[in-house]
Image: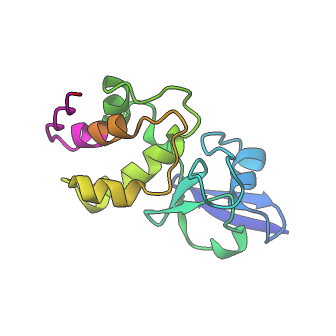
Amino acid sequence: MATTLDVNGKPVTVKAAPETPLLWVLRDEIGLTGPKFGCGIAQCGACTVLADGQPIRSCSMPISGLAGVKITTVESLGGNSALQQAWVKNDVPQCGYCQSGQLMSATALLAAKPKPTDEDIDAAMDGNICRCGAYQRIRAAIKDAAGMTPAAPAKA
């Protein structure tokens, strides 16, 4: 069955069963490999994309529920967005596996709250697991991208 999706501002027609998770359509049919398979049960956030500007877990979202929805993946950031520059400046990536999901959640946060508090950041990023433990650097990068001075880390 053919389904047309709006991905990164372009209509894309795919031949996949309606129950096929968006993640597999993005990766296998469209060739967008930014969203990653992590857990398959919407718990880790590696597959996070935006649907009409809101973060969703693409591993558990069937394409049948996405008609007329604007889907945005990390590829839309172009590799040189202010957020990506802040990510590099703050040495966020280590293994990099979770980064596309982290970036998409951060993108949605900054669109909704251009000057987020630590509590806003924690709430928006909750559920995006970083196995390398880069959470403090992620927070600093989000604040940096928002034009805010990150708080100095506490000394031990």
Expressed as whole percent of the image width and height from the top left, the position of residue 53 reads 43, 63
Question: Residue shown at 26%/39% (left/top)?
Answer: 145
Tell me the colour scheme of the image: rainbow
What secondary structure do most residues of the magenta stretch adopt?
loop
Looking at the rendering, the stretch of residues picked out in magenta corresponds to 142-155
Question: Residue shown at 66%/75% (left/top)?
Answer: 65
Question: Residue shown at 41%/54% (left/top)?
Answer: 125
**Residue 93 higher or lower than 53, as above or below:** above
Q: Residue furthest front?
A: 156
- In the rendered view, does 120 fall on the left or right side of 96? left
Expressed as whole percent of the image width and height from the top left, the position of residue 112 reads 29, 62
**Number of numbered labels in the structure image:** 0
Question: Residue shown at 52%/47% (left/top)?
Answer: 129
Expressed as whole percent of the image width and height from the top left, the position of residue 81 reads 36, 36
**Residue 90 higher or lower than 76, as above or below:** above
Q: Which image quarter is the N terminus in?
A: bottom right
Expressed as whole percent of the image width and height from the top left, the position of residue 9 reads 51, 55
